[in-house]
Image (cartoon, grey):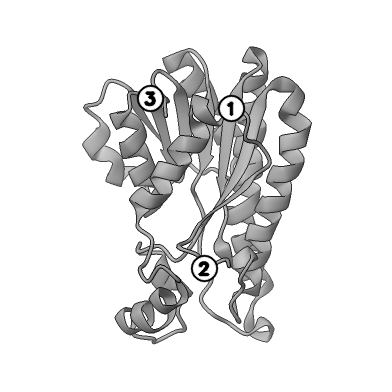
Amino acid sequence: MSVENKTIVVAGAGGGMGKEIVRLLLADKANVVGCDINVEGLSEFQTEGNFLALQGDLLDEAVVKDMFDQANTTFGGINGLVNAAGIAQRATPIEEVSLKAWHKIMNLNMTMAFLTCREAVRYMKENKAGSIVNIGSVSTTRPRPGLQSYVASKGAIESFSKALALELAPDKINVNILHPGPCDTSMLEQFAKEGANIDEVKDSVFKQSVPLGELLTPIDIANSVKFLLSNEAKMITGTVMHVDGGRSV
């Protein structure tokens, strides 16, 4: 699965999944641009000649435009985009969800991806080639009570990606959605109810929901992302890939 010499922008590179995606792509000799509001966790990659960390608010149009311009200037093109940024929703009845909370979830899980995709496409169209991977969630297929806003945001990512795949097909730009199952990152505890013991919830709720009997790990997601970015996946677009240990069945 070759990504060698491809320039790939990873939005949300500072998170658990994002960081593992960066690590794997760098190991396979891709040029990687890690974008996040906080890039301190990416310091271990700074000595890599094929890595560029860019800090900024990915909900700011001017910032996003500048990030992609820097990526293009540094590496001479943009071949791939991974949208791994996002936030969870603590299980909350809808009547207790504020409009502010709703907008925050939709902005960070959907609007941010819209902005990065829009900017990436400007560069990919020039070369009539490119690959975009948007990270969704198995919850779109198997929702849980109290996560209505989060599920809506990830459902929007799926529909957006499918529509974009058709729109960009004439330009040979692939767009796919990857729906992870429960993944053992710090984000997982954010789905639990307020005051819940996360270690107990991991075993009694999340782990038990996966037919293969264990939580996903960031490398499970990273391996699948790399495949969708690779030359071997050139005829895959508009596809929903579940990497969930059977949770979606």
Q: Residue 25: give x, y in percent of width and height.
A: 36, 33
Label count reads 3
Mark carried by residue 223: none
Task: First in sequence, mark 1 or 3: give its number.
Answer: 3
Up the image or down, 146 lies above or below 152; here it is: below
Residue placed at 60% from the left, 47% from the top? 177
- Front residue of 137/191: it is 137
Residue placed at 59% from the left, 55% from the top? 109
- Circles 1 and 3: CB atoms closer than 8 Å: no
Q: Is residue 209 left or right of residue 41?
A: right
Q: Secondary structure at mark 2?
A: loop
Q: Secondary structure at mark 3?
A: loop
Mark carried by residue 247: 2
Q: CA distance from mark 1 to mark 3?
A: 17 Å
Residue placed at 35% from the left, 64% from the top? 184
* Amino acid carrying mark 1 in the image: Lys
Q: Quadrant of residue 104?
A: bottom right
* Amino acid carrying mark 3 in the image: Ala
Up the image or down, 200 lies above or below 87; here it is: below
Q: Which residue is mark 3?
A: 30
